[in-house]
Amino acid sequence: MEALRCLPGVGPKSASRMAFHLVERDRVGAERLAHALLAAAEGVRHCRRCRNLSEAELCSVCADPARDASLLCVVETPADVLAIEQATGFRGQYFVLMGRLSPLDGIGPSELGLDRLEARLDEGQVRELILATNPTVEGEATAHYLAMLARERGIRSTRIAHGVPMGGELEYIDGGTLAHAFSGRREV
């Protein structure tokens, strides 16, 4: 039960339900889970180019010659890469920060591997830096910092749109989201 509590969002009750289920009803599943976790812990590492999670030295995106190296999308986590890959037709490449700037938490540029990002920008292939950090205070500060790095190199930087979700109704949208959507409006 204690081992399961290391997972995000798993409290004592959830951990005990999972543990009892695995031990009482699904021992084969428990063994399969244990082997999968061990294999992941031993075999998954960071891609040397983009810092995404990978079983190889280069992840599948970086190793794909059909991807457009002139488009570089910066995200906070590997989960963000997966979300973009599943929901969009983006055919560029990525750089995964593994976090966001947060001076109060001691997370600065070096903790996010920004020296590696700068080196990649200096290679001269990137023409557009797409900033896909989360719309939090730290995510916005990170995007601003990255835009500055791009501007210093003459690279175009763009920010993904934020605002009213598809299917959303204006009366239920929070004020900050609605204000951001209004300030980012575009011609139709």
Image: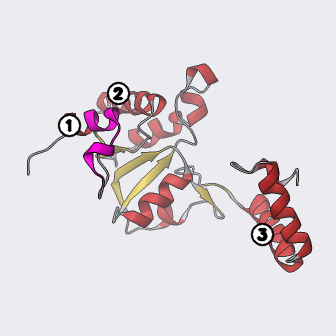
Instruction: Evaluate whether residue 154 shows in this view.
Output: no
Which kind of residue does numbered mark 3 sit on? Ala
Q: Nearer the viewer, mark 2 or mark 1?
A: 1
Question: Seen from this angle, which residue lies furthest left?
Answer: 188
Q: Nearer the viewer, mark 1 or mark 3?
A: 1
Q: Nearer the viewer, residue 9 or 105?
A: 9
Q: Which of the two discs, 1 and 3, labels the residue nearer the N terminus?
A: 3
- Is 140 a magenta residue? no
Occupied quadrant, residue 142: top left
Which kind of residue does numbered mark 1 sit on? Phe
Return the residue at label 3: 36
Label 1 and label 3: CA atoms lie apart by 46 Å
Residue 90 position, x and y percent, is: 34, 61
- Residues tagged 2 and 1 counted as in contact (Cβ below 8 A): no
Under circle 1, the secondary element is helix
- The residue shown at (52%, 29%) is 101
Question: How crowded is the residue under tag 3: few (<14 C-alpha within 10 Å), some, or many (20+)?
Answer: few
Return the residue at label 1: 182
Q: How is the image coloured?
A: secondary structure
The secondary structure that most of the magenta stretch takes on is: helix
Q: Find the magenta span and give its range.
A: 168-180
Question: How crowded is the residue under tag 2: few (<14 C-alpha within 10 Å), some, or many (20+)?
Answer: some
Position above or below: 123 against 83: above
For residue 24, which numbered disc appears in the image? none
- Residues tagged 2 and 3 counted as in contact (Cβ below 8 A): no
- The residue shown at (85%, 70%) is 22
Return the residue at label 2: 148
- Is 173 a magenta residue? yes
Q: Which of the two discs, 2 and 3, labels the residue nearer the N terminus?
A: 3
